[in-house]
């Protein structure tokens, strides 16, 4: 079973921060494991305090629903199938972009959440972490896969 460790989370956060700096923005980046449990978070200088909770909840939502949070935007509007979903789970469900699952071999193993700018920028920053995860070295030992 593949686990998101602190070491891996730091690499993903670094990649996301580099992208945020390229965009000229300050973000909060959060990483959770496959159970939605906190692994790591990083608040860039001058990032909004509110973004700490938002980034973590974006990551949690992406794991809890096995989908990017941006996919919920149209489903959660008043005429959508999931209208009101953001009021469930003690308000943790985020229905706008910036949370993306981290998948390996078709299974969600964690997620990243980014918050602090426009939704489009938050998605860009989160995607940088996803790209870093996809290229992170993995080794197969028998039937298990580990991150190096």
Image: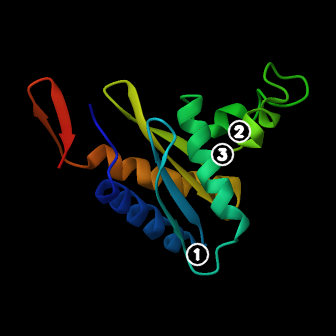
Q: What residue is disc 1 on?
A: 24
**Disc nearer the start of the sequence (3/1):** 1
The colour mode here is rainbow
The residue furthest left is 142
SS class of the residue under badge 3?
loop
Estimate the x, y position of residue 13 in percent, counting from the top left.
42, 62
Q: What residue is disc 3 on?
A: 97
Residue at horizontal 51 percent and vertical 74 percent from the top: 21
> Which one is in front in this view, the residue at disc 2 or the one at disc 3?
2
Residue at horizontal 14 percent and vertical 23 percent from the top: 143
Foreground residue among 55 and 26: 55
Residue 104 lies left or right of residue 73; in this view the side is left
**Dot 3: few (<14), some (14–19), or many (≥20) neighbours within 10 Å?**
many
Residue 81 lies left or right of residue 108; in this view the side is right
SS class of the residue under badge 2?
loop
Q: CA distance from mark 3 to mark 1?
A: 19 Å
Q: Is residue 35 above or below residue 82?
A: below
Estimate the x, y position of residue 43 in percent, counting from the top left.
56, 71
The residue furthest bottom is 45
Which quadrant of the structure image shows residue 99? Answer: top right
Which quadrant of the structure image shows residue 84? Answer: top right
Residue 134 lies left or right of residue 87; in this view the side is left
**Disc nearer the start of the sequence (2/1):** 1
Q: What residue is disc 2 on?
A: 93
The residue furthest top is 81
């Amino acid at each position: 079973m593949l686990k998101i460790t602190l070491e891996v989370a730091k690499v993903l956060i670094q990649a996301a921060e580099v992208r945020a700096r390229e965009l000229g923005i300050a973000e909060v980046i959060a990483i959770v494991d496959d159970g939605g449990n906190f692994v790591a978070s990083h608040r860039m200088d001058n990032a909004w305090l509110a973004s700490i909770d938002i980034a973590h909840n974006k990551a949690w939502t992406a794991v809890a629903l096995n989908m990017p949070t941006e996919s919920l935007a149209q489903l959660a509007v008043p005429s959508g199938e999931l209208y009101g979903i953001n009021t469930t789970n003690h308000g943790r469900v985020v229905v706008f972009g910036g949370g993306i699952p981290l998948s390996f071999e078709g299974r969600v193993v964690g997620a990243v959440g980014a918050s602090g700018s426009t939704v489009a920028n938050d998605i860009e920053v989160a995607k940088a972490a996803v790209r870093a995860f996809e290229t992170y070295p993995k080794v197969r030992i028998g039937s298990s896969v580990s991150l190096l």
